[in-house]
Image (cartoon, coloured by chain):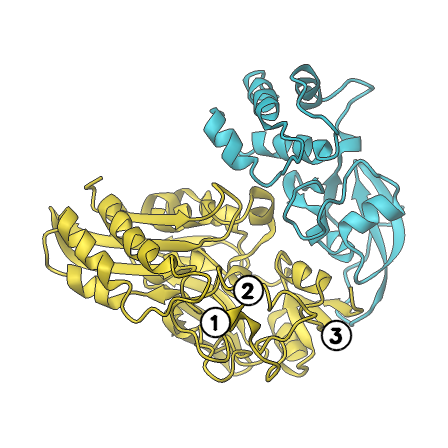
Amino acid sequence: MDSPGPLTSTPSSQFDIVLTVNGASHRLAVDAQTTLLDALRDRLHLTGTKRGCDLGQCGACTVLLDGRRINACLMLAVMAQGRSITTIEGIAEDGALHPMQEAFVEHDAFQCGYCTPGQIMSAIGLLTESRETDDATIREHMSGNICRCGAYTNIVAAVRDAASRGA
Amino acid sequence: MLPFSYAAAPDTDTAMRMVGADTNAAFIAGGTDMLQLLQEAVIAPRHLVDINALPFVGVRFDQGSSRIGALTRLSDVADDPGIRQHFPLLAQALLETASPQVRNMATVGGNLLQRTRCLYFRDATVPCNKRRPGSGCPAQDGLNRINAILGGSEQCIAAYPGDMAVALLALDAVLVVQNAQGERRMSLDDLYRLPGETPQHETALRSGELITAVLLPPNTAAANSHYLKLRDRASFEWALVSVAAALQMDGSQVRRARVAAGGVGTTPWRLPRVEDALHGRELTADLARQAGELAGDGATPRTGNAFKVPMLQRAVERALVTAGGLA
């Protein structure tokens, strides 16, 4: 796959971009308004990342961008070229669940499951940020992820557990 | 979303030229407010100019003062060890801003320039003098719980919603602004305009100008500063009322005070009468209460937010007590 050329400084509304998602390169044609979330779900059919609000207020669309957690709905796909994106589909290795996924299962940290991919990606991002891992800090630093089913208690337990195991 | 074209500016001159020449063009950096405004059709720029390649990233220190590049992500400022040590008020305000995901993308410059959360501004289907000049202000006697009690006019009572700007006011921040002629500096105080008769003009920036850095003079209040944010939820929620208090103390005596409020003004709001009541005085619980009372001077409560006046007064009192070590 050719590496992407430099982004044009000539205004355009259609772009051929290469998105690097979970280590794989994908070439796709997008218009300027296509968000990263749109591209992941509708174009690449990676539907693990969910659309909850499209306004950056719920966190269901949380992915990692160069290892840092962001809201995919708040980024234009054309601005994600050249960056490395990790989604929920990309964290299990050789069929083995990521430790954070395991912790969510063990602690029953979801009901309907809709917010769960975003919760897991956000929690993985949190643990790379070198923060304290007491419950109050976990709650505060997971506040970008809303759970309508109210699974917060178990989500905190899962994150605490994963942190203690060095996930 | 309404259609627009996009271009990534390779350098500052190109960026300024593209936006300066076209009133339908706008800068995009972190995009965390821009994407919301686009999704809800609050604004409709025809051209977006991406400025992320410009060299305005990083936090530098020089003999106690700091220079923060305007493209630095909020989380990088909040987690910077030098900022945490020398400007804890700023780090504290940032950690109470938005969510971790938003902070990882949002930039300092974009955060300063964020638009109001007024319900009518953000609803493209209703009148709004800021969004559509001359169409009216339904907030005046409408759903105005989150609107301003200071600095409003008959045309507009939209509150400035940000936290970082309030803390920066209390830290005497100066902005570096670049334009086609070169560079100019302005005190953060001078960036924001009151709505008056022209609420669509929110800042003193001219078309195409770019904020490139925030300068902070050496902080004499690091040991006695506090950011207090009062809101409906414990996190990831805008301020109903917030207060930044920065005190330079000599024992229990206040040598110098800077106090600013958020959530209550149409711009980030300095409270000079509160500051003047503190200078040279011994900080006691009584003085904090008296100073807090002064914060309500000139406030105009709205039909839906009269609670903000006593809340502001008590928040100032509480912030002073905490900053002063009396808590």
User: Which of disc 2 and disc 3 is earlier in sequence?
Assistant: 3
On the picture, is B192 further left or further right than B98? left
Q: Which amino acid does label 3 sit on?
A: Arg
Q: Among the chains, which one is yellow?
A: B
Q: Quadrant of residue B219?
A: bottom left
Name the mark on residue B46. Answer: 3
Residue identifier under label 2: B118
Q: Colour of chain A?
A: cyan
Residue occupying the point 49% across, 49% down: B97
On the picture, is A79 further left or further right than B292? right
Mark 3 crowd level (few <14, some 14–19, many ≥20, 10 Å Cα): some
The answer as to whether the residues below labels 1 and 2 share one chain is: yes
Name the mark on residue B38. Answer: none
Q: Height in image: A164 above or below A118?
A: above
x%, y% of residue B140? 50, 72
Residue identifier under label 1: B157
Q: Mark 2 lies on which chain?
A: B
